[in-house]
Image (cartoon, rainbow, N blue to C red):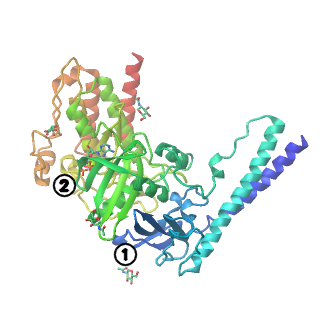
């Protein structure tokens, strides 16, 4: 019994030490300014609550330098980011350095181990800070590992004496810092490893790059405004690769940034895997890698297939659930900001194999900054797809100082999408052919003027066939969609309300 009490004391002490140690790391409130090679719009600088970093990588004989911000939310593991630990001169294909003074990464070019040496070359940079940071990093890893070893031994001891389960500490905190990355694991494994309990931001940059560099492009599957979409293979898994040209760097960066918002991962939001830029000196290719869904977009799917009433409700519910998650603000350190999509349409929703959906194309999304009650980017007022624009967007009367305005415009678009789905609901062999909203009122690729005439002046909305009123599920759908596309934005349902209505109806059906 005494052994147990001593063990408890020791583990408390170790915990206290650990806490003290981390506390010293989280007190710097000011943002660090770093050099950023992919931020032309911000005069090649970025700001971070973490470190500045510089990396050098070698791929197919091409050397790429990257110098950017490494935000705390991208630290993996959070206490000692891998990315600060691929020490220069040790690996042949990857080296990176972190530092913590303003613009300290501007002239850092971490050296690779040259192919004909087997010995370690020394850190070469014109900045002594970098060496210091490397040391600090080494300490950051060594100390917690020691502490954790002690704790684990203590816990093991308690466990042996008292025969009770004692798994207080996650196993991956014991992970060796220099373990080669990507050894025989799947993307899902890695995401689970990095996202379990840590608020899910995505894979660390180095891992993202490694994945990107191992992908083989197989076939093009689509072309949008900002780039081409390919099906690619990574170790036998399908992935979707959206390739942006260097002119669309901002879109690429923004989309990757939004996907990596804390807590964004969700069943009904397209799963982000990695972003990478490949530069061969004259040409930059920007990749955005996500889950691949073989059924394609909702637009593709509805054009090809019909759904039954259950399938319709499940599909609609999944989209409303995804949108409600985007729109929701979650408070707390592991919270997420409210996000508005601004380009919701059937082409930007993907259909999964079980008929539920995931919302994609987050490149135009805006995040709500609660502290200043503003949106996190400069707005140009009319973005999105004209056909799906809410009346207040078409008329430019939307109040951009009020974040809810953007959510309400999303809900209007959701109403049109519900209509597209409902038309394809097959009851007793009867259904409508697939059509885009307003197919009968505006030409393909309509202008703002044409849309405004129909939506704002004539106040037209997609027509609801009489037959829908005799089928309960379609009745529910038509009621919801009408409440999504009111002219008065404030009167529209919220995504959460829609989700609840559809879920209630689905649950009622299940009971029958
Ligand atoms: N993750 C994915 N899995 C499977 N297919 C996809 C995926 N992402 C995109 N696609 C396919 O690629 C097409 C093009 O997508 P993209 O988002 O580039 O353009 P878009 O949505 O058609 O137009 P826009 O540029 O207006 O968004 C989609 O319509 C879809 O068919
Ligand atoms: C951009 O940065 C350079 C130095 O890096 C500075 O001389 C210049 O004034 C900056 N320009 C603007 C518009 O901030
Ligand atoms: C870089 O890639 C582009 C496009 O793939 C190609 O046209 C160009 O020749 C390449 N340049 C070099 C230096 O390899
Ligand atoms: C559909 O598949 C996802 C995983 O891709 C799963 O989480 C979800 O529960 C499934 N939904 C239904 C209704 O089967
Ligand atoms: C449905 O698909 C066909 C074949 O790809 C295409 O020609 C047609 O335009 C699509 N329907 C709509 C409404 O876009
Ligand atoms: Mg799209």
| Mark 1 C-beta to ligand 2 under 8 Å | yes
> Tag 1, which secondary structure?
loop
Q: Quadrant of the C terminus?
A: top left
- The numbered disc on residue 341 is none
Image location (x, y in percent) of residue 90: 57, 67
Task: Please name the residue shown 63% across and 55% down the image.
Answer: 176
Image location (x, y in percent) of residue 261: 44, 54
Tag nearer the camera, 2 or 1: 1
Contact? badges 2 and 1 (CB < 8 Å): no
Instruction: Please state which of residues 438 and 247 is positioned toward the viewer in this rendering.
Output: 247
Q: Which residue is mark 2?
A: 395
Direction top: furthest residue: 512
- The numbered disc on residue 43 is 1
Direction front: furthest residue: 116
Q: Is residue 379 visible?
A: no
Mark 2 to mark 1: distance in Å? 34 Å
Image location (x, y in percent) of residue 62: 39, 67
Relative vertical location of residue 482 with respect to residue 375 in this rendering, above or below: above
């Amino acid at each position: 019994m005494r052994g147990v009490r001593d063990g408890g004391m020791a583990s408390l002490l170790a915990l206290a030490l650990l806490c003290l140690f981390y506390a010293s790391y989280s007190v710097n409130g000011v943002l660090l300014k770093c050099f950023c090679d992919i931020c032309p719009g911000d005069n090649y600088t970025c700001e971070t609550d973490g470190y500045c970093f510089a990396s050098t990588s070698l791929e197919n004989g091409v050397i790429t330098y990257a110098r950017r911000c490494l935000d705390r939310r991208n630290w993996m593991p959070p206490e000692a980011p891998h990315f600060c630990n691929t020490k220069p001169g040790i690996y042949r294909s990857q080296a990176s350095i972190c530092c913590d003074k303003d613009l300290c990464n501007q002239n850092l070019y971490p050296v690779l181990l040259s192919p004909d040496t087997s010995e370690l070359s020394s850190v070469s940079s014109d900045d002594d800070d970098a060496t210091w940071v490397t040391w600090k990093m080494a300490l950051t890893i060594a100390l917690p590992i020691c502490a954790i070893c002690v704790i684990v031994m203590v816990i093991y001891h308690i466990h042996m004496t008292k025969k009770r389960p004692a798994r207080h500490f996650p196993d991956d905190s014991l992970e060796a810092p220099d373990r080669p990355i990507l050894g025989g694991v799947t993307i899902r494994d890695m995401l689970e490893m990095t996202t379990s309990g840590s608020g899910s931001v995505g894979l660390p940059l180095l891992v993202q790059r490694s994945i990107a560099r191992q992908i083989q492009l197989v076939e093009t599957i689509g072309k949008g405004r900002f780039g081409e979409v390919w099906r690619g293979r990574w170790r036998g898994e399908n992935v979707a690769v959206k390739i942006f040209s260097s002119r669309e760097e901002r879109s690429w960066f923004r989309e990757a940034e939004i996907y990596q918002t804390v807590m964004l991962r969700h069943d009904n939001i397209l799963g982000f895997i990695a972003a990478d830029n490949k530069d061969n000196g004259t040409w930059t290719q920007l990749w955005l890698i996500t889950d691949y869904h073989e059924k394609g977009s909702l637009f593709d799917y509805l054009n090809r297939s019909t759904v039954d009433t259950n399938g319709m409700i499940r599909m609609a519910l999944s989209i409303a659930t995804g949108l409600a998650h985007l729109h929701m603000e979650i408070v707390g350190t592991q919270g997420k900001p409210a996000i508005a999509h601004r380009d919701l349409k059937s082409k930007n929703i993907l259909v999964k194999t079980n008929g539920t959906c995931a919302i994609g194309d987050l490149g135009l999304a805006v995040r709500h900054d609660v502290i200043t009650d503003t949106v996190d980017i400069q707005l140009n007022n009319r973005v999105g797809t004209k056909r799906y624009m809410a009346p207040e967007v078409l008329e430019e009367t939307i109040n951009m100082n009020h974040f809810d305005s953007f959510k309400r415009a999303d809900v209007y678009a959701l109403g049109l999408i519900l209509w597209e789905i409902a038309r394809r609901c097959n009851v007793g062999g009867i259904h409508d052919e697939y059509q885009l909203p307003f197919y009968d009122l505006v030409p393909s690729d309509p202008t703002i003027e044409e849309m405004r005439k129909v939506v704002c002046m004539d106040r037209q909305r997609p027509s609801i066939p009489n037959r829908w009123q005799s089928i309960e599920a379609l009745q529910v759908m038509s009621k919801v969609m009408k409440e999504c596309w009111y002219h008065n934005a404030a009167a529209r349902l919220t995504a959460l309300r829609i989700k609840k209505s559809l879920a209630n109806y689905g649950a009622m059906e299940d009971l029958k």
